[in-house]
Amino acid sequence: NYDIIALQEPCLTHMGLTASTPGWRVVYPTVHGADGASRTRSLLLVNTRLSTNSWNPIPVRHSYVSAITIRTQDRVVHLLNLY
């Protein structure tokens, strides 16, 4: 019954992706997979129950940081996963 999971040191496949079930959207650091970027050390899993209209990735140019902004009727929350 979670809406967001913050993972550190995720297991990545040979293609540089992590496994997830259909109920989750994976949010990688902005530089994930970019030439010269260090290995991804953090990511967020966002439950598909949360509308993609209610959250957006925050661009952070570091492979150790994954971040999103969540908007509700009452507030705006910035969620950062720092390795």
Image (spheres, grey):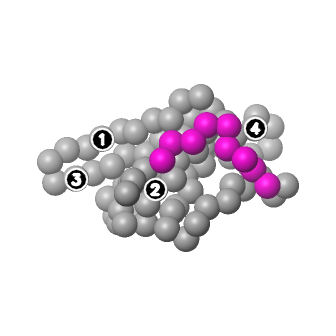
Specify the amino acid type for callout 2.
Answer: Val
* Residue at 67% across, 59% down: 19
The label shown at residue 39 is 4
Q: Which contiguous range is marked in magenta?
A: 5-13
Q: Is residue 12 above or below residue 63?
A: below
Specify the amino acid type for callout 3.
Answer: Thr
Judge whether residue 78 is colored magenta. no
Specify which label sits upstream in the sequence, 4 or 3.
4
Picture coordinates of residue 58, whole percent (x, y): 46, 44
C-alpha span from label 4 to label 3:
32 Å
**Mark 3 residue crowding within 10 angstroms, few (<14) / some (14–19) / many (20+):** few
| Secondary element at tag 2 | strand
C-alpha span from label 3 to label 2:
15 Å
Q: Are marks 3 and 1 in contact (CB under 8 Å)?
A: yes
Q: Circle 1 sits on which residue?
A: 77
Using residue 73 as the reference point, say whether residue 28 is left or right of it: right
Specify the amino acid type for callout 1.
Answer: Val
Picture coordinates of residue 54, whole percent (x, y): 32, 59
The label shown at residue 72 is 3
| Secondary element at tag 4 | loop
| Secondary element at tag 1 | strand
Q: Quadrant of the C terminus?
A: top right
- Residue extending farthest to the left is 74
Specify which label sits upstream in the sequence, 3 or 2.
2
C-alpha span from label 2 to label 1:
14 Å
Specify the amino acid type for callout 4.
Answer: Arg
